[in-house]
Amino acid sequence: VAEQIALVDQAIATRPDAVVFVPVHLTELDASVLKLNAAGIPVVNYLNRLAQGRFVSYVGSDDYRLARDVAAYLFRHMGGKGDVVMMEGVPGAVTSRERVRGFLDAVKEWPGIRIVATRAGDYQEATAKKVMTEVLAGGFRMDGVLSANDVMSLGILSALDAAGLRVPVIGVNALPEAIDSIKSGRLLATVDFDAMKIGCMATEAAIRHLRGEAVPAEIILPVQIVDRSNYQPWDRPLEQRECPRWESVVR
């Protein structure tokens, strides 16, 4: 948080024409956004939705729905019963909060599913690996793992591999590394929450606003579960992936 506050102050000093902004915390960047507003700098908020401040547009995805849907995918794979470990992201991040809410609401719809442990992996691979190693050392039985992003899923898989365990794990983001894990059968599924595409749309929203064009107050990109049956369109490095056409998202 302190680093991002300092970066916003540096950005304001350069007098940009617009800012596309993904906050690292739900509320602790409010004062920074108000500074941007006071400086008359248009702001497009993306990924983590802020409640305070004025914005040209919010660009993101439905974190609650994608989490609920991919959790249900895991539970169906498990036959509708079993013990599950849940790995949260950064506790203060809106994406993590909404994904956890989606996971938990999905559990309510499956009486045979039980959450046996919940931990925060801070959206980091090394942290998730360490935390999952601790969970395994605690003797928790698990039949599946809900992970709030792909990076943590990769750490979870490393911890499971080290323990000689094969447990179905889901993630979120459809990162190239996650796609590789799906192809090899290690990761069960992920969701096309593509931060690159969202960043593309947020930047284009800022450019269109500066051109004087009308921009929707909210732009929500569609989500899709990705597994071994349909991973091919995502089986490309990020450098080879393309920004979506504005007209394909904004109608």
Image (tube, rainbow, N blue to C red):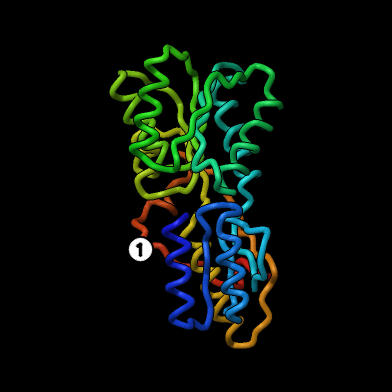
Residue annotated with mark 1: 240
Q: Residue furthest left?
A: 162
Q: Residues within 10 Å of mark 1 (few under 14, many from 20)?
A: few
Residue 67: x and y, percent? Answer: 59, 40
In the picture shown, does residue 139 fall above or below 46?
above
On the image, the x and y values in percent for residue 2 come to 45, 57
Quadrant in the picture for the C terminus: bottom right
Q: Nearer the viewer, residue 189 or 59?
A: 59
129 left or right of 245 in image: left
Q: Is residue 111 above or below residue 15?
A: above
Element assignment for label 1: helix
Report the residue at 49% width, 27% height from top.
145
Q: Quadrant of residue 135?
A: top left
Image point (47%, 68%), residue name: 8
Closer to us: 108 or 123: 123
Residue at 53 percent of width and 79 percent of height? 18
> Mark 1 is on which residue type?
Gln
Task: From the viewer's perspective, tell me whether residue 168 is left or right of residue 183.
Answer: right
Report the residue at 59% width, 87% height from top.
Answer: 211
Q: Please, which residue is most extreme toward the bottom here?
A: 211
Query: Where residue 46 appears, x then y in whole percent?
Result: 56, 62
